[in-house]
Image (cartoon, helix red, strand yellow):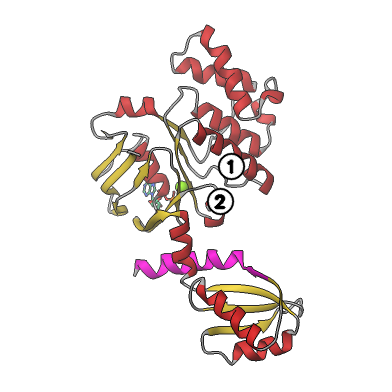
Amino acid sequence: MSLMIETRGLTKSYGDFVALRGIDLKVEGGDIFGFIGPNGAGKTTTIRILTTLLEPTGGDARVAGMSVWDDKDSIRGLVGYMPDAFGVYPDMTVTEYLHFFAAAYGIGRGERHGLVSGLLELTDLTFKEDALVDSLSKGMQQRLGLARALVHDPKVLVLDEPAAGLDPRARVELREILRELQRMGKTILLSSHILSELEEICNRIGIVEQGRLVAQGSTEEILDQLSAEGSRIQLRTTNNKEALELLNAHPAIGGAALDEDDPAIVRVELVGGDDEIGRLSTILADGGIGIRHLSEDRVSLEQAFMRLTRGLVQ
Ligand SMILES: Nc1ncnc2c1ncn2[C@@H]1O[C@H](COP(=O)(O)OP(=O)(O)O)[C@@H](O)[C@H]1O
Ligand SMILES: [Mg+2]
């Protein structure tokens, strides 16, 4: 696989304010790459540089080997971009809207019909082809934005916060479409300020914080790294009272307590990574206590993420 997006020492200042402090991103062809970081971290700035809408202050950003400094037009032909906000929609139907953007890309009338109906099918919007854009739900508008980003059949898709504000069902639909686009050979970079929003969609993740890339790797590696920061487990056991005593007596366990609302649940803080869960099972098994249910808190990943980003900035 070849590098499809690469930035080297990418910097950007807005006046005195340094928004990007040397970003080295690597996105391989065929990746669904999650660009994750809290608000203000520099995601949109990086994305606008990659789409040639904004010039960097220093360093370089390349798409398919072409530099944003010299090859703006070629890059625009290769990249489909979905901004984080669309502003006000015109008084147009869904079909008219896509025809409008296809025409803007110089695609002739004859070709446009097949193209637009194909895009509507891909984004599951055929049933809304005659609806006014304004009347669509948030999820449908996001899918229309995606269709719009695809009119010139770009190799690379850059989507700024595409899952923001979507309900879980709309998020699943978005994920299915992105997987389909990946199968079609597209390379996709998408941003989010919420890790859990992207962890199931992306094969690779980069975490950005205050203009620095603090971690980059396969989703698995990054999640392992985060869970090594400590995690929280929910347990149901055959004897919660004894389980608590055993766990709290053990130095390798960060602490255990009954859930405040539901005493059938034991909440455990772990200090290490995955092997800690094995140790916890052993401690309980040795005490003759059975585990009825064990799950990792989703929230804790988010907290680990916050800790990781905060810790590395100092
Ligand atoms: N046009 C601008 N002028 C001045 N500061 C800006 C401008 N655009 C963004 N910034 C600042 O740069 C930082 C990064 O912004 P942005 O790239 O939008 O972050 P993100 O998309 O991760 O939320 C923020 O502190 C933001 O306030
Ligand atoms: Mg942004």
Q: Which of 72 and 254 is in front in this view?
A: 254
- Residue drawn at x 54%, y 42% is 162
Question: What is the quadrant of residue 210 in the picture?
Answer: bottom left
Q: In this view, does 71 lie above or below 46?
A: above
- List the residue tagged with mark 2: 200
Q: In this view, does 102 lie to the left or right of 236?
A: left
- List the residue tagged with mark 1: 175
Tell me which secondary structure the magenta stretch mostly adopts: helix
Q: Is residue 111 magenta?
A: no
How far from the left and from the top, in percent, is residue 111? 52, 10
Q: Is residue 309 magenta?
A: yes
Task: Give SS at disc 1.
Answer: helix
How far from the left and from the top, in percent, is residue 308? 43, 67
User: Do the residues bearing badges 1 and 2 touch, measured as CB atoms within 8 Å?
Assistant: yes
Q: Is residue 91 visible?
A: no
* Quarter of the image with the C terminus in it: bottom left
How far from the left and from the top, in percent, is residue 127? 71, 24
* Quarter of the image with the N terminus in it: top left
Q: Is residue 142 above or below residue 300?
A: above
Q: Which of 28 and 45 is in front in this view?
A: 28
Q: In this view, does 73 lie to the left or right of 110?
A: left
Q: In this view, does 149 lie above or below 33?
A: above
Q: Which of 199 and 37 is in front in this view?
A: 199
Q: Give the range drawn in magenta.
A: 294-313
Distance between mark 1 and mark 2 Cα atoms: 8 Å
